[in-house]
Image (cartoon, grey):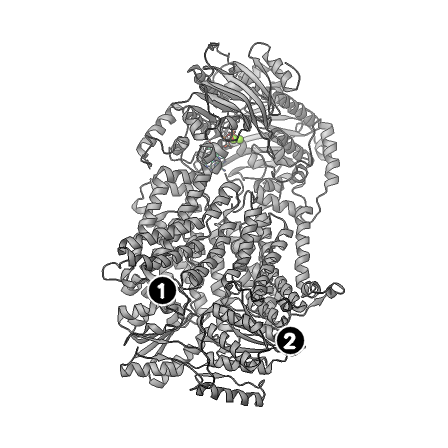
Amino acid sequence: MTGLFSEVFLSALLFGAVTAAIPLLLAGLGEQMSEKAGVLNIGIEGMMLAGAYLGFVGAFYSGSLWLGFLTGAAGGVAVALIMALLCVRIGLNQIVIGIALTLGLEGLTALLHHFQFSRSYPRLPAADATVIPLLSDIPVIGPAFFKHHLIVYLAVALVFAMGYLYRRTQLGLNLQAAGDKPAALDVAGIDVIRTRTIAVLTTGALAGLGGAYLANVGAGLFIPFITNGAGFLGIVLAMLARGRPVWVLFGALLFGVCLSLTTAMQVAGINIPTDIIQMLPFLAVMIMLVLFGRRASLPAALGIPYERGAR
Amino acid sequence: KSIAILTPEEGTDYGWNQQGIDAAKAAGKAAGVEVVVAQGLGYGDVRPTLRELASDGASLLIAHASGYNTSAPEIAKELKVPVAIVDTPNGLEKGLVADYTLSGHQGAYLAGRLAAKMSRSKSVGIVVSGEPPSWNSQSAAFAQGVKAENPDVKITYAVIGPAAYSDAAGGKRVTESVIASGADIIFGQGNGSSFGMLQAVETTKAADGGKVYFIDVIGDKSPIDKGFLLSSVVWNIEPVYAAMIADLKADTFGTKHYTIGLKDDSVKLLKTAAIPDNVWTDIQALREDVISGKIKVDPVYDAAAVRALMTSVAQ
Amino acid sequence: MSIDTAPTASATALDATSAATTRRDILHRLLMTLGPILIALVIAGCILLAVGVDPLAYYGFVLEKGLFSPLGIQQTLTRMAPLLFLAAGLIVAFRAGMWNLGGDGQFLLGAVTAAASAPVLVEILPAWLALICSFLIAMVVAMIWSLVPALLRAYQGVNEIITTLMMTFLGTSLANVLVKLAFRDPTTTVPQTRTLPVEDRLPRLFETTITSGLLLGLAAIIIVHLVMTRTAFGLKLRIVGANPRAAVHAGLGVPGLTIAVFAISAGLAGLAGAVDIIGVQGNVRADWNPAYGLAVIPAVFLARMNGFAAIGFVFLLSVLSIGGESAARRLGVPNHFTLVLVSIVLIVLALAEYFDHRYNQSRRA
Amino acid sequence: MSGSSSSSVAGRDIVALEGVTKRFPGIVANDSVDLSIRPGEVHVLLGENGAGKSTLIGMLSGLQQPDEGRILVDGKPTPITSPRHALALGIGTVFQHMMLVPTLTVAENLLLGGPWWQRPRTEELAARVAEITSTLGITVKLHAKVSELSLGEQQQVEILRAMVRNSRLLILDESTSMLTPKGIDELGALMRRLVEQGLAIVFITHKLKEAAAFGDRISVLKLGRKVGEIPPERFRALDEQAIISEIVELMFGKQKDDPEAVERPVRTVRAEAAPLLQVTDLAVAPTDNAPGLSSISFDIRPGEILGIAGIDGNGQKQLAEALAGQRAATGGSVRLEGVAIEALSVGERRRRGLRYLTDDRLGEGTVGTFPVSINFFLKQVGAAPFWRGGVEQRGEIDKRAAELVREYDVRTPSLKTPVARLSGGNIQKVLLARELAEGAKVVIFNKPTYGLDLANTLASRQRIRDTAARGLAVLLISTDLEELLSMCDRVAVIANGALVGTVENTDDARTRIGRLMIGLAA
Ligand SMILES: Nc1ncnc2c1ncn2[C@@H]1O[C@H](COP(=O)(O)OP(=O)(O)OP(=O)(O)O)[C@@H](O)[C@H]1O
Ligand SMILES: Nc1ncnc2c1ncn2[C@@H]1O[C@H](COP(=O)(O)OP(=O)(O)OP(=O)(O)O)[C@@H](O)[C@H]1O
Ligand SMILES: [Mg+2]
Ligand SMILES: [Mg+2]
C-alpha cells in the first residue's frame, strides 16, 4: 500500500488541492468584502459563472491567459454592477436578487455555450507555471506549492493585502462601518452607497477572477454549470472567517485538501463506498462550524439596505 | 407517425446523449418516420414531457436515460403509448415497454487489452464522474482486459468529487493525480467532466515525459481531438432503434431485449492513428475471440464489485 | 442577523391580513404582477430575438403548454404540490427571521425516507395508513436533520445561513448514500429505491392527472398562513423574527421557538419531498435533485411571505417551468433559457414592487 | 478654533435659516422656520417631542433637504447637500441617536471619514486629541472599543469628534439626556469655553433649567413652527425663574413657575408592612461590555418608591434585567411576596406580578413594525381573553387597545399604526400601559422619562406616583437626580455594580447622594 504514494503522486494531490482551493479562496475573499460592507452577496455563484465564461472566451480567442483573467474579472464586475444597482442603490432584497442573478447566469452561460462551443468544446493549453527557485526543490511540498501559475501566488498575496486593507487603511475602516453602522459612516462624510458599491464591485471582480481561474486553469475549458456550487461554498467560507482573510485561505485549503484526500483514499483502495468518502469535505466544514461557529459575529447591518435619514 | 427521444442533456456531448439522438434520427430516417427530439431535460420529472409528446402523437417514446425508467412505463400504461427504457431488463411489457440495456463491456474489455499493450509505464488509470451501472460494467471489463493482457499492469481507479457530472475542473484535477500516480493511459467516463479529463491528458506529461493517451467511451470525440485520443468504445444505437421500430410494426414490441455488442459492430473500438497497425491486428483477433465466445466477458454492474476488482488488480 | 425584505414588508404584510382587501386593491395587485411579467417577457424576448427565435411563438407555446391546454394546466398544477409545501416551510422560517436556505437537503431526505418506507408499509398496512406513516416519517427525518442548525442557532448563535447551506450539501450526499447503500431496490441494476406502485400513490383528482398532493400543498400553505397571522403561536414566531430582543424581553422562550421554527420549516420541506414521491415520482434515484428550493425562495420573498400571494407566485413558476420546457423544445432553444426567463421575471417583479412602494409613499405625502 | 471663525465678527450669522419647510408623509415637520445661529452664542432649541427639532438639525447636517426656504452659510445661500458637505462647511453634529461604530475603537471612529487610500493617521490624531482634551478638560480612552464605553463616554467621544473636525458650528441634540448632574454641569462649562473661543453652538434639550443655565438665546418650536425666541439681550436681563416662566408660556401658553418642581407628596409607607420585593446578595457575572453585579441587597415595601441613582453604565441595566429574569444571576435570591423567584423565567415572573419597563423602547420594548394594538399585549401573547385556544381575538384586542389608548392618552393616528412611527413619548405611554396592566405588584422603571418632553415627563412621573399610591412596590432607576429626589422614598446609589449606600429622601439627600456617587461616604 505504501508504494502507492510516490512522491510525485503526493505532490500531485497537494497540487490539485491548491488548484481546487484557489477559486474558493477568491470567491470567499470577494464575499467577505461584501459582507464586511453589509451586503449579503448570494449572487456570487452567478458572478463566478460569468467570470468563468467570459474568462474562457477571453483566453481562448486571445490566446493569453492573463487577458482571460481580465475578461473574467470584468464579467464578474458586470454582474456585480447589476447587484450594486438593484440592491445597494435602490435597496431591493439581496437574497431575491442574488438568487435571481445566479439562476440567470446559469441559464445565460449555458445558452451561450450551446450556441458557441457545444460542437467544438475548445480546450486551452496548459497554464505555464512560475517556478519559485529553491522552494520548488523541496521534496513533495515544492512541486505542490511552488510550481503554479503566477496568479496563484497573487491570489495568496491578495489574502495579506486584504488583511492589510481591512486593518490598516481608511477604506478598511469605511467598509467595517458600512457593515456595522452605516448611518455613522454617512454622518462622518463618507457615502455609504458608494462604499458598498465599491465593495460589491470588488466582490464581482474577485468572484469573476475565481471563475476564470476555475475555467482556464482548473479545467482548461468552459462547460455549463462548471462552478458547481463553488460560490455558495465561498459564502460559507466568508462567514466562517469572521472578517479575517487568512481564515478564508485556511478554509479554502482545508476544502481542497479534503477533495484530494477523497482521491487519495480511492487510489489507496480503501474500501469505503465513494459516496461516503465524498461527504468528507462537507463534513469537515460542518465540524468546523460546530467547533468554532459559536457567536460567529456578522456585521450588524448585513442584508439591510441603507437609506439616508430613514427610520 | 413519429417517434420521440428524450435525453437528460443536450445532444452535443460526443457521448451518451448525442449517440442516442443521432441514432434515433438515423433509424427514423431509414424507416421514414419523423423524429422528435426533447433534449436537456435534466434528471428530474419528465412525466410532463412524456405526456405532451404522447399527446402530440408520438407512437414511440424513447426515454434515453436510466433516470426515466420509472416514469416512462407509467406513462406508457396511462396513455397506452409504447415506450423504450434503458437498464431495466425485467421491465418488459408487450406492446408497451421495451428495454434496451446497453453495455459496452465487450468493447471496454478490448480497450483494456489495448491499454495494457500500449502502456509504457505499465500503469493505467480509470477516471469516472459517477458510478452508474453501464459505466461500472465498462470499468470492470476494462480492468479485466488489462489484467488478461498483462497481470503486472497497475490500475488506478478514481471517482471525481461530489456532484461531479459537470465538474470539469474536478475531472482535470483527479486525472492529473492519476497520471501522477504513474498512469500513462486514462480510460475516462463522464459527461461534462470528461472534457476536463481530456484537457488533463493533453496538458500533462507522463512520468517518462511522453504523451498520456485517453480512451473515451460511447461517443467519438475524434472531431475535437488534438492527438491524444487513443481510442473509444463507440456505441452505435441505431440498430437497436431500428429493431424497435420494426418490432412496433410487427406488433412484437416489448417482447425482446435489445443489446449492443461487438458482433454487429454496434460496439466497436475506435481506430485512431495512435494505434500501431500490429497492435490493432492483435485487437481485431481478440475481438473475434470475444464474439466467438472463446473469451468470456461478464458485465459487472455493481459499484462495490467494481471497486473490489480494482483493489485486487492493484495488488 | 436580520434581513429586511422591503422597507416595510412585515408591516404591510400584517396590514394586508387585517385590512379587508377591497376589489380595487386586488385589481391593483393583479396589475402590479402582470405588468412586470409583461415587461420581463419583452426583455427576455430580446434575448430570444438575438439567438434567432421568434419570441411570440415562444411565449405562445409557454402559455399554451403551461396554462391553456388541458394537459398543460394539469401538469402545472401537479408541479405545484411540492413547491407549495416548500413555500409554506419557508414562510414559517422567514417570518420568524430564520434564513433556512437548507430546503433542498431537507426535501431530499424527506423524499428518500418516504420512498424507502412507503412501498414497504403499503404491503403491511392499509394504503391510506401506510401513506400517512410515510409522510410522518419523512417529516420527522427532515426535522431531525434541521436539528444541527437549529441547536447551533438557538444556543450558540451560529448564523443559520452558513449551517443550512452546508447541511444542504451534506444532505444531498447523504440522500445519495442512502439510496445506493441502504434503501436500494435489489431488483434493479440502476441504483434507486423500491417503487411505490402507481395505484398506491396519492389519488389523482377526478379524471385528470393532477395529483391530490396539490390539495395537501394548498392546505399546508393556507394553514401556515393562518397560523402565522391569526394565532398566538404565529405571533410569537413573528415577534422573534421582527425583534429577537423584544422576544426575550417579552418572556418568550426564544431558543425553544427557534428550534420549533426549524422543525416546522424542515418538516414542511420533508413533506414536500414526500408529496413529490408519494404523489408523483414513486421512487428516488441516485443523484436525483430537482433543486426546487432555490427557485421557491425568491417567490416567497416576492409574496412578502403572504401565503396566498405565494400560491400565485408558485403557480407562475410552475407555468414557466412546464411551458418553458415545451416551448424551448419546439423552437430549438436549449432548455436553459427557462432559467434566464425566470431570473428576468424575478428581477422585474422585485423592481416593480419597489416602485409601487415608492409611489404609494409619495402619494401619501 | 479655526482661524476663520475667530476673525468673523460676533453678531454676524454663521448659519441662518430662512423660511425653511420640511414635509414628511402626512406631517409638516418644519413650517417656515427662521433661525439665526451666531458665533459666540449657545442657541438653545426647545420644543415638545415631535416638534421638529431633530428634523431641523437633519437639514443643517445634510441628512435631509428642505422642501422650501433656504439655508445661508456665512450670508450666502448654500444648499447643504450631504453630511460630507456639512462637515466641509464646519458644521459638526452630535446626533440624538448614537452615531459611532460600536465595533471600532474610539480612535478609529474619530478617524472615520479620511481619504480612503490613506493609512489612518493615528499619531496625528492622538496629538490633536490631546490638545483638545486638555483645553476642554475631558479624558477619552482612544484605544477602547466604543461598545465598551458607557453612553456618557460615547457622548463625549461624539463631541470630541465634532471638535477634531474644526467645526465652527457645534450642534448637540439632547446630549444631556445620558449624563449625570455633574456631567451636565461639565458639559455646560465646556460649551461656555467653546463659545468663548468663537464657536457657535446649537443645544437641544427638554430640560428648562439647562436651557436657562447654559443658553444665550432660546428658540421654541411647536408643531414645526417657531413660536418664539428670547434674544441674548433679553436673556441676560432675566433671572432663571423668569426665563423658565417665559419659556413655559411660549411652549404651553399657560403660566406656571417651575413645572418640574413638583412637591413630593408625603406618602405614608407603612414601615411594618412585609416587603413586596426582597433582594439578597444578588450577583451577576460581568460580560465583555458590561460590568457585573455583586452582593446587591434591598427591600421594597408596598407603596414605596426606591430609587437607584448612579452614573449610567454602572450596572443599572444589569440589575433590572437580572430582576426581570432576562439575565442569569450567579448568586443571591430574589423574593416576591416572600416567594423565591430567582429560578423562574421571564414570563413566570411577570405572571406573578413583577413588571419591567425597559429603557430601550424601540430596541426591546416594542416591535416597531407591529401595530400599536399588538404592542400593548406583547407580553401576554396567548392569554385570554385576547387569544382563545391560541387564536387571536381581534375584536377583544382592538377593544382593550382602544381603552388603553384613551386611558393613557396615546397619540396615535390609529391602532394599526406601526408603533415605531409614534413619538418617543407616545411609545413610552404604550409601555406604561402594558406594564401597569392588571396584576402588577412590583414595577421596575428603567429611565422612564429619558428623552421625553416636559409634558410627557410629567405625565409619566405622575403615573409612577399613582402606581406606588395603589400599594405597589416601585424600583425607579434613573440618572436624573432631580427626578429621583422628587419621587423616591429612599435612594440607593449604584457604582461599579454594587450598591454603595442607601439614603432616606430627606432634605440633605441631594448632597449625600452626590457624595456617594463620587465615591465618598454619605
Ligand atoms: N424620517 C422621517 N420620516 C417621516 N417623518 C419624519 C421623519 N423624521 C421626522 N419625521 C416627522 O417630523 C416630525 C418632527 O420630528 P423630529 O424628530 O424633528 O422631532 P423632535 O422635535 O426632534 O422630537 P424629539 O424631541 O422627540 O426628539 C415628527 O412628528 C415626524 O412626524
Ligand atoms: N417612519 C416614520 N414615519 C412617520 N413618522 C415618523 C417616523 N418616524 C418617526 N416619526 C415621527 O417622529 C416624531 C418624533 O420622532 P423622534 O423619534 O425624533 O422623536 P421622539 O421619539 O418623540 O423623541 P425621543 O427620540 O427624544 O424619544 C413622531 O411624532 C413620529 O410621528
Ligand atoms: Mg426624538
Ligand atoms: Mg429629536
Q: Is residue D246 above or below residue C160?
A: above
- Have a look at marks 2 and 1 and say if they share a chain: no
Q: Residue furthest left?
A: C206
Q: Amino acid at mark 2?
A: Ala
Q: Is residue A215 above or below residue B244?
A: above
Nearer the observer, C60 or D167:
C60
User: The residue tagged with tag 2: helix, strand or loop?
Assistant: loop
| Residue B292 image offset from top left, x and y in percent | 44, 88
Q: Could you classify mark 1 by the number of other residues whose Cα lies within 10 Å: few (under 14), some (14-19), or many (20 or more)?
A: many
Quadrant of the rendered structure where residue D176 is?
A: top right
Residue found at x 27% / y 56%: C127
* Res. D274 in view: yes
Q: Amino acid at mark 1?
A: Gly
Residue found at x 38% / y 61%: C320
| Residue D322 image offset from top left, x and y in percent | 52, 28
- Locate the N terminus of chain B by quadrant: bottom left
* Res. A123 in view: no
Chain under disc 2: B
| Residue C260 image offset from top left, x and y in percent | 42, 43
Chain under disc 1: C
D204 with respect to C219 (left or right)? right
Label 2 with label 1: CB-CB less than 8 Å: no
Disc 1 residue lies near ligand 2 with CB under 8 A: no
Report which residue position mark 2 lands on. Answer: B206
User: The residue tagged with tag 1: helix, strand or loop?
Assistant: helix
| Residue D496 image offset from top left, x and y in percent | 62, 25
Q: CA distance from mark 2 to mark 1?
A: 50 Å
Quadrant of the rendered structure where residue C71 is?
A: bottom left
Q: Is residue D389 above or below residue C57?
A: above
Report which residue position mark 1 lands on. Answer: C323
Q: How many marks?
A: 2
